[in-house]
Image: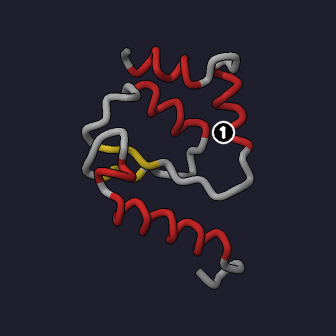
Amino acid sequence: MDGEAQFEALFAGVRKAEFLQLLAQIPAPVTIVYGDASGWLTPAEKAKLQQARPSLPPIVLPGGHNLHLDAPEALAKIMLRTMREKAAPSGAA
């Protein structure tokens, strides 16, 4: 199954445009992280995700789609940093 088909299957019942609108509205901390060897999303799909959250530059780690297995320490550091930055009072991060 190619990336487009996987993307559609993952969000079956939710149109891609609706998903991207929802992504743009999430008030919680969001970090976009990709594996450099992942073929799950095409460059065009990654660009659409980026357009939904333009203030969040994507982070690219070595690995595939399963970064929790391919780069667990790097992924954990990114998650912790994001949570700390978003939880800190303004100017304290």
How many numbered callouts?
1
Image x and y of residue 8, in percent:
54, 17
Residue 70 in percent (x, y) is at 29, 51
Residue 61 horizontal side relative to residue 51, left or right: left
Viewer-proximal residue, 54 or 2?
2
User: Residue at 65% of width from left, 82% of height from top?
Assistant: 91
The relative height of residue 78 versus residue 27 in the rendered view (above or below) is below
At 31% from the left edge and 52% from the top edge, which residue is drawn?
Answer: 61
The quadrant holding residue 51 is top right
What's the colour scheme? secondary structure
Q: Quadrant of the N terminus?
A: top left
Point 35% across, 59% down: residue? 72
Q: Position of residue 59 (x, y in %)?
A: 39, 53
Q: Is residue 69 left or right of residue 30?
A: left
Q: Indicate the quadrant containing the C terminus: top left, top right, bottom left or bottom right.
A: bottom right
Q: Is residue 86 left or right of residue 64?
A: right
Q: Residue furthest front?
A: 69
Please say if 4 is above or below 91: above
Q: Which residue is mark 1?
A: 23
Q: Observer-nearest residue: 28 or 10?
A: 10
Q: Is residue 52 above or below residue 61?
A: above
- Classify mark 1: residues with Cα within 10 Å, few (<14), some (14-19) or many (20+): some
Residue 35 percent coordinates (x, y): 32, 44
Q: Secondary structure at mark 1?
A: helix
**Residue furthest bottom as drawn:** 92
Residue appearing at x 69%, y 20% in the figure = 14
Question: Residue type at mark 1?
Answer: Leu
State left or right for residue 75 relative to residue 20: left
